[in-house]
Image (cartoon, rainbow, N blue to C red):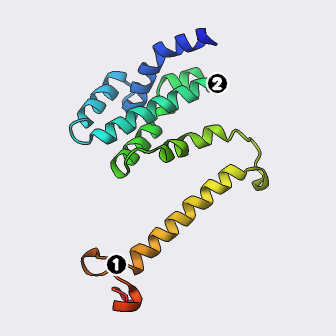
């Protein structure tokens, strides 16, 4: 196992940089590195989030045995890089976000029956409920200038 990880260390940087370069359809690790360096002064949290997510996705793709040519070209890292930019810009890094990022790789159940996918169904239900609550709050509990108002006290800001 240790020989596999030593070999993995030499290739992860190349594959992660190539994955970051895939965001702009450039399969070049140098292009990915330059893109990452260009993002650091503009949005440091986004750059860190993208680098961590892209590297984590590349490592997990390698450890799970996905085709060598695909993960080496960065095909598993570019979506993670975009997700890392999104989460890095919108949210402060927390252990909850890390757990959500790793959850699909922990739930290794290949079954397609909903009854067998308890973790996936629970996480998606929580996501759906969180989105519904935020939508209701954003629609009914905001007033002029997006200030917090109680709809039963001041009325609804918009017409239904």
Establish if 146 lies above or below 108.
Answer: below
- Look at 34% across and 28% down and name the residue there: 32
Residue 75 shows in this picture = no
Question: Residue 34's x, y, as percent?
Answer: 27, 27
Residue 128 higher or lower than 86, as above or below: below
Q: Which of the numbered marks, if any, corresponds to residue 65?
A: 2
Q: Looking at the image, is mark 2 or mark 1 nearer the viewer?
A: 1
Q: Is label 2 in a helix, a strand or a loop?
A: loop
**At x 56% / y 66%, what residue is drawn?**
129
For the view shown, which residue lies furthest in the left direction? Answer: 41
Label ID, residue 94? none
Residue sitting nearer the eye, 35 or 155: 155
Q: Quarter of the image holding residue 94? A: top left
Percent from the top left, x then y, of residue 20? Answer: 39, 32
Split into 4 quadrants, where in the image is the N terminus?
top right
User: Dots 2 and 1: beta carbons under 8 Å?
Assistant: no
Q: Residue at x 53, y 26 (%)?
A: 59
Q: Find numbered disc 1 in the image and state the secondary structure of the residue it sits on.
A: loop
């Amino acid at each position: 196992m240790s020989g596999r990880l030593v070999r993995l260390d030499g290739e992860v940087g190349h594959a992660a940089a190539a994955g970051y370069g895939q965001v702009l359809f450039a399969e070049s690790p140098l292009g990915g590195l330059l893109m990452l360096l260009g993002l650091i002064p503009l949005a440091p949290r986004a750059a860190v989030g993208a680098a961590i997510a892209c590297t984590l996705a590349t490592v997990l793709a390698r450890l799970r045995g996905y085709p060598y040519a695909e993960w080496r070209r960065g095909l598993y890292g570019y979506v993670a890089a975009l997700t890392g930019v999104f989460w890095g810009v919108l949210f402060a890094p927390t252990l909850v976000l890390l757990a959500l990022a790793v959850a699909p790789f922990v739930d290794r159940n290949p079954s397609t029956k909903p009854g067998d996918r308890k973790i996936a169904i629970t996480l998606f239900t929580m996501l759906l409920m969180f989105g519904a609550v935020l939508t209701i709050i954003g629609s009914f509990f905001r007033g002029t200038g997006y200030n917090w108002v109680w709809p039963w006290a001041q009325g609804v800001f918009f017409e239904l």
